[in-house]
Image (tube, rainbow, N blue to C red):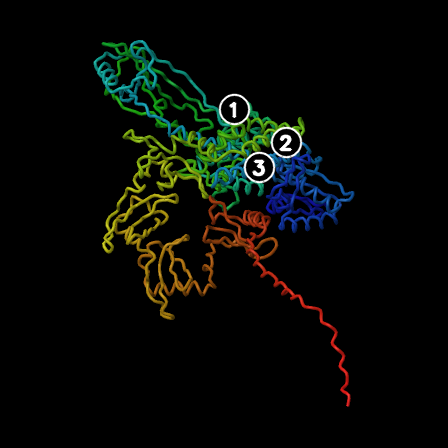
């Protein structure tokens, strides 16, 4: 019996169909060991010794694998064909050695780029040894990420409260997003004017733009005022216009190369609206069921047999006219051979999207995108006829106009991948009428239009990945995970597909740029990636790379440890000044305190993060949130907004802004009564009626019919609630806290009590079937979002995952990952101090007793 070890149960299931009864295919469920999340897991003092830990779930998997290996004749490691796959094989092998399960059994490593019968059997016939340099590259990357994270993050926590973590690649990606936002904030629009002439010739209308003026070529921004534009407009209308020159030039548009990981993520984002993580989840499933080749790759080349199959399919579907004479050969730009696998393509081009045996609509969409891109990559170029006509205006000024038109004469690859027509909004894509030198087309109108330059666009997930790839930051397997970490840390948010840095993220970036500048430089990070590539190629020793990095990095950390908070604040105020204190329209000082009118505002650091405060503290208590200051909204709510007068108490209710956001305040008999705004309630929407309702909370609902104790309704940390005798029960709607009556309150409290003091049972959204270890798996809707449940294990779904799209394989992986972390450790209550033992009472010093006098019998 031969034991084959792969990562996932889905992959094991597919491979098992291709191998005979002499093989047993087992899944490791991903990595089986990891560095514990504690100090000392990588020890630079002892040659970077790494201490690995096997989690509880992996122990069970490894027990099964070990038992099978002991009874087997041969072990075959068949994990994925990249660095992570090589690392998983290495980890499994190391554990088997520790358990002394191998003895003299032969161990082989096989790789295949597609899970098809042909690819798997060919790989089995051509085994190799474990790729040690590839494993070394993994060890180096893992050690670097650990050293940066576990060394830099504590510095952030101490010097910048409220920060979450820093990472070798994530911090550089965050810097890109923050720098783009700063560009947008500092951008100053510039006015310019365009002058466009509308013509007609033989019933066809066309436009011509201003090309030159008084002998000088006109650029986009050269006409700056309405007066200039109107003068040009009048000169054109008054002039005699003649076609001076016509040039016709055929051009070609070549097809795109097949997909790499990053281009797949980019196109899936722009064409299908999938996030990078969603794209990779779907691609993983398509790979595991044998539909596409391996999806983590920098390579654009395609195997010769796949090229032949593609060309045959093109001839069958489109005809020989769409086939170029020779096959198109694409060359990868990847420097590291370990990532340069074949491009992402269908394993069988004759399996058209319509023939894909899969009921999941998202999988069909992504497969269709991959199939079309692969097919298009081998099709003929699109042929486009481009016509340029120069028109001369004879009159008071020397003016030349230019009209450009394009028409597709042969669609080529564009008939399959991309629009069959050119962009209708592109003025150069419109077809021109037949024009000859000397023609005098009819002038219909001349339009002078005002424009303003626009700031650079925010990054989308797709464009950020493209930028990271251009800079050499990260690798295909890390892009989606990096973006996920930044969102999970609340360093960035996704808004209408645009990535916007949160203030927490901007603070972290400013801190790192000020005190760890080298380690967030694009060139340094890209250079480190190149060294990791050199390790995987066997060109350099990975411990040399770690030694050189740690020497300088550790010295920098030691230096920063003695940094005073005032130095941190000065650096952050300098870097973020324009963001925190944007210029005011009236020209007044944006840093002047609106309360005391004498102090200056600046960034402050508190226990829960950064906020804006007055330098005259404690005499002046003015504070506001960082976000309010940056958006310029703080002035409206920072102690100057009187909502109105409370009808019962005759005092004003004010809207104020504090460190934790806007709140209402009124003073009755010298005592301040305050109320925070519910989540989603903007300060500008609060009128007097709402203010009175909010500041009147908590309110009495009525006495409980059973014991007469008052039931109250209010707003708390977890939303609206009713309270009776120390027992809380949540209300589903914020509005209900103002209107809930006695009967409803009693019912909600009773339902809470019937649930044993717990929240009601979570709603089941989807039944997934049984887990390989037994027991049902379900997708449920919980208080904090959707999650997968198996027994006592609850695994939260990623933010961008549709609960209805979760598959069995995905659920198993999430459950395994959750189990690997182990149960959440509850903080132990401090041990009760034992009452000090009573000291024995001090013995009183007693005089030594004299021996009793002997009694003598009385004489008689």
- What residue appears at the point 55 percent right and 26 percent down from the top-left corner? 524
- State whether residue 610 is above or below residue 551: below
Local packing at callout 2 (Cα closer than 10 Å; few below 14, some 14-19, many 20+) is some
Pointer 3 or 1: first along the chain: 3
Nearest to the observer: residue 126 or residue 309? 126
Up the image or down, 804 lies above or below 596; here it is below
Q: Are marks 3 and 2 in contact (CB under 8 Å)?
A: no
Residue 234 coordinates in the image, percent (x, y): 22, 16
In whole angstroms, how far apart are the C-alphas of marks 3 and 2?
A: 14 Å
Residue receiving disc 2: 546
Q: Residues within 10 Å of mark 3 (few under 14, many from 20)?
A: some
**Residue assigned mark 1:** 324
Q: Nearer the viewer, residue 78 or 428?
A: 78
Q: Secondary structure at mark 3?
A: helix
Please state which of the two labelled residues, at mark 3 or mark 1, is closer to the viewer: 3
Secondary structure state at the residue bearing disc 2: helix
């Amino acid at each position: 019996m031969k034991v084959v070890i792969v990562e996932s149960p889905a992959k094991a299931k597919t491979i098992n169909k291709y191998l005979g009864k002499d093989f047993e295919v087992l899944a490791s469920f991903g990595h089986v060991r990891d560095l514990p999340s504690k100090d000392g897991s990588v020890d630079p003092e002892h040659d970077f010794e790494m201490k690995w830990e096997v989690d509880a779930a992996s122990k069970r998997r490894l027990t099964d694998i070990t038992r099978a290996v002991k009874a087997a004749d041969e072990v075959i490691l068949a994990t994925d064909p990249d660095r992570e796959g090589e690392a998983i094989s290495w980890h499994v092998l190391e554990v088997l050695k520790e358990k002394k399960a191998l003895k003299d059994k032969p161990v082989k490593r096989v790789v295949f780029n597609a899970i098809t019968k042909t690819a798997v059997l060919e790989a089995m016939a051509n085994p190799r040894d474990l790729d040690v340099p590839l494993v070394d590259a993994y060890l180096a990357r893992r050690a670097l990420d650990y050293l940066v994270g576990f060394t830099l993050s504590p510095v952030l926590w101490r010097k910048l409260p409220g920060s979450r973590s820093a990472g070798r690649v994530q911090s550089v990606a965050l810097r890109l997003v923050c720098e783009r936002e700063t560009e947008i904030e500092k951008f100053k629009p510039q006015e310019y004017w365009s002058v466009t002439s509308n013509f007609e010739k033989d019933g066809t209308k066309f436009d011509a733009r201003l090309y030159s003026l008084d002998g000088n070529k006109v650029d986009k921004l050269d006409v700056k005022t309405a007066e200039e534009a109107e003068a040009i407009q009048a000169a054109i209308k008054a002039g005699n216009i003649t076609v001076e020159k016509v040039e016709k030039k055929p051009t070609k548009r070549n097809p795109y190369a097949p997909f790499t990981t990053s281009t797949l993520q980019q196109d899936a984002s722009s064409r299908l609206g999938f996030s990078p993580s969603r794209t990779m989840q779907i691609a993983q499933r398509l790979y595991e069921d044998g539909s596409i080749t391996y999806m983590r790759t920098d390579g654009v080349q395609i195997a010769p047999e796949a090229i032949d199959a593609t060309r045959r399919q093109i001839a069958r579907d489109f005809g020989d006219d769409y086939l170029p004479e020779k096959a198109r050969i694409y060359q990868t730009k990847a420097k590291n051979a370990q990532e340069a696998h074949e491009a992402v393509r269908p394993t069988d081009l004759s399996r058209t999207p319509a023939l894909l045996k899969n009921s999941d609509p998202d999988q069909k969409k992504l497969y269709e995108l991959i199939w079309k891109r692969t097919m298009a990559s081998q099709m003929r170029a699109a042929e486009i006829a481009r016509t340029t006509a120069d028109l001369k205006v004879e009159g008071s000024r020397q003016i030349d106009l230019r009209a450009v038109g394009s028409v597709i004469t042969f669609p080529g690859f564009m008939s399959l991948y991309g629009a069959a027509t050119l962009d209708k909004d592109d003025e150069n894509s419109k077809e021109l009428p037949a024009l000859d030198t000397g023609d005098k087309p009819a002038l219909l109108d001349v339009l002078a239009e005002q424009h303003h330059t626009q700031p650079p666009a925010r990054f989308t997930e797709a464009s950020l990945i493209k930028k990271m790839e251009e800079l050499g930051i990260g690798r295909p397997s890390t892009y989606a995970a990096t973006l996920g970490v930044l969102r999970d840390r609340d360093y960035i948010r996704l808004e209408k597909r645009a990535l916007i840095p949160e203030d927490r993220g901007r603070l972290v970036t400013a801190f790192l740029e000020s005190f760890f500048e080298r380690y967030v430089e694009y060139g340094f990070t890209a250079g480190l990636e190149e060294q990791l590539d050199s390790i995987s190629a066997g060109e350099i020793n990975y411990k040399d790379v770690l030694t050189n990095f740690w020497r300088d990095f550790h010295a920098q950390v030691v230096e920063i440890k003695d940094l005073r908070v005032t130095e941190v604040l000065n650096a952050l105020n300098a870097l973020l000044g324009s963001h925190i204190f944007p210029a005011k329209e009236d020209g007044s000082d944006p840093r002047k305190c609106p309360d005391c009118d004498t102090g200056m505002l600046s960034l402050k650091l508190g226990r829960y993060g950064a906020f804006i405060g007055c330098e005259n503290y404690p005499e002046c208590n003015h504070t506001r949130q960082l976000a309010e200051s940056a958006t310029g909204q703080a002035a409206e709510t920072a102690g100057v907004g009187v909502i109105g007068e409370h009808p019962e108490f005759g005092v004003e209710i004010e809207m104020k802004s504090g460190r934790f956001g806007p709140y209402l305040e009124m003073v009755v008999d010298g005592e301040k009564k305050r109320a925070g705004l519910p989540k989603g309630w903007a300060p500008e929407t609060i009128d007097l009626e709402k203010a009175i309702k909010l500041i009147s909370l908590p309110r009495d609902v009525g006495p409980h019919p059973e014991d007469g104790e008052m039931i109250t309704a209010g707003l708390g940390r977890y939303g609206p609630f009713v309270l009776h005798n120390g027992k809380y029960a949540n209300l589903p709607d914020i509005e209900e806290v103002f209107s809930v009556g006695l009967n409803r309150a009693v019912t909600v409290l009773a339902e809470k009590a019937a649930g044993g003091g717990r929240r009601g049972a979570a709603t089941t959204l989807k039944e997934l079937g049984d887990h390989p270890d037994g027991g049902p798996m379900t997708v449920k809707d919980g208080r904090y979002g959707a999650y997968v449940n198996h027994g006592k294990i609850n695994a939260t779904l990623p933010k961008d995952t549709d609960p209805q799209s979760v598959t069995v394989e995905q659920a198993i992986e999430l459950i395994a990952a959750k189990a690997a972390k182990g149960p959440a450790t509850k903080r132990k209550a401090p041990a009760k101090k034992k009452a000090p033992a009573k000291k024995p009472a001090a013995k009183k010093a007693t005089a030594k007793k004299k021996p009793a006098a002997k009694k003598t019998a009385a004489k008689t």
